[in-house]
Image (cartoon, rainbow, N blue to C red):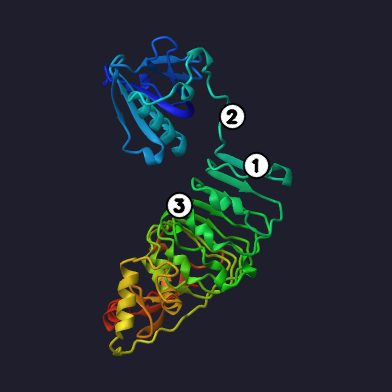
Amino acid sequence: MKIPCTVLVADRSMPTLPANLRRKPCKSTLALCKHPKNEEFFLLLFSGQNKNGTKYNLKDNLKQVLTKFVDEGKFTVQLKNPEHDLCVQGDVIQVKGFLHLLRRALEGKVSAKEMTFSSMSVTPVKAKDIAPIKLVINKRLDYPSKGFPRTLESVYINDLKCCSLPKGILQLQKLKILDLSNNSIEFLPEELNKLPNLKELNMSYNLLGKGTLKQWQWLGGCLSKSLSTLDLSNNTLTFLPDQLVKLHNLTKLNLNNNRLKLLPAGIGNLRNLKILSANSNLLTILPGSIKKLTLQAIDVSENNFEQNVPVNYHNFQLPVCSLKEYAAKKVLWSRIPYPKGSLPSTLIDYLDYAKYCICGKACFTVVCKQRHNLSLSSISETVNTMANETVYVPIDCYFCSRKCFLQTVIKRFRIPIAR
């Protein structure tokens, strides 16, 4: 049996070797073989630099096999002579199959029909036989005739005027990058949130603005932990669902060239967000929770922000929250997941459409609302503006308590909007 993989050969006899002389991981083929005469097992390692292969005997020569990270497709074979560690990384399914056969071979449970008897018949896996990890489709003929290979890590489907997401993509558990820009997609299926490794999603230049609120259920699920980059620019969007705040690991969000009038109230809870771009929209005000962000760059130029927003300094007393509201606050503050089916749909909607105080806590019916002015330079290292624009914008602040109101509004010196 042979598998294509990436192998790093580490020499334990020279642990202090300088970094520039150490071997680097390289694409290889690892084969498990059996001698035709003495029936002893051995490993053959081929690479681009060693096309003849290196033979490693296994009888009384195997120190141990490390399989702690086998679920990631990684394992290490430690040999006694030579003192080499073969650090292997490959497809999870192929790796597990290889290790299973190796264990059975060492236990003497492999039949003659299961094993290649002669090392002469073992050759490296050809490049054309290696399952691809990247697929680019720019025309209909580029679609794979046998379906999408399960090994794909990045898929680019552009300029095809596709109206829906190909169903085969939903089976790609290793997918990290999905680029569907320049198509005619109006919504994405909810099953998209089951892809556990998706990090980048590019939906620019599509028709997501024609979709309904219920067609954004793909926000959340596994994407809450994996998705780091989301591009929704040029989609004629008129709203963004509050479920966007479920993408806890989002670092880059592009909303340019849409028709948005508001951003989700809880956008400030995207603690990892570093780049926010929402230029050329119809924004008149930003959510107060945005004060919590620490950005590297923000661009909200070419919008319709109001000027000279009045601030009413008044004393108030909020009533006591209901038990339902207290429980909902705790669920959102603790980031307890509530997938579809775990709660009644009315409660899921109740949690999804929460407002957020500037302190970061959710609030529902017991809340006070005020408008304030914010300097964008106080939340971002870089602020992109047009020549005639100011770095001050109005924000809509919600307060979950009198304490938050006093600390944020009355005790804070108000900076007027510069003209």
> Which class describes the residues within 10 Å of circle 3: few (<14), some (14-19), or many (20+)?
some
- As drawn, is 329 to the left or to the right of 113? left
The total number of labels drawn is 3
Residue that appears at 43% across and 34% down: 97
> Which class describes the residues within 10 Å of circle 2: few (<14), some (14-19), or many (20+)?
few
Residue most extreme to the top? 37
Q: Viewer-proximal residue, 354 or 294?
A: 354
> Which class describes the residues within 10 Å of circle 1: few (<14), some (14-19), or many (20+)?
few
- As drawn, is 165 to the left or to the right of 192? right
Task: Give the image quarter of residue 314.
Answer: bottom left
Is residue 413 visible to us here?
A: no
The circle on residue 146 is 1
Disc 2 residue type? Asp
* Residue at disc 1, secondary structure: loop
Disc 3 residue type? Pro
The circle on residue 129 is 2
Q: Pointer 3: what residue?
A: 196
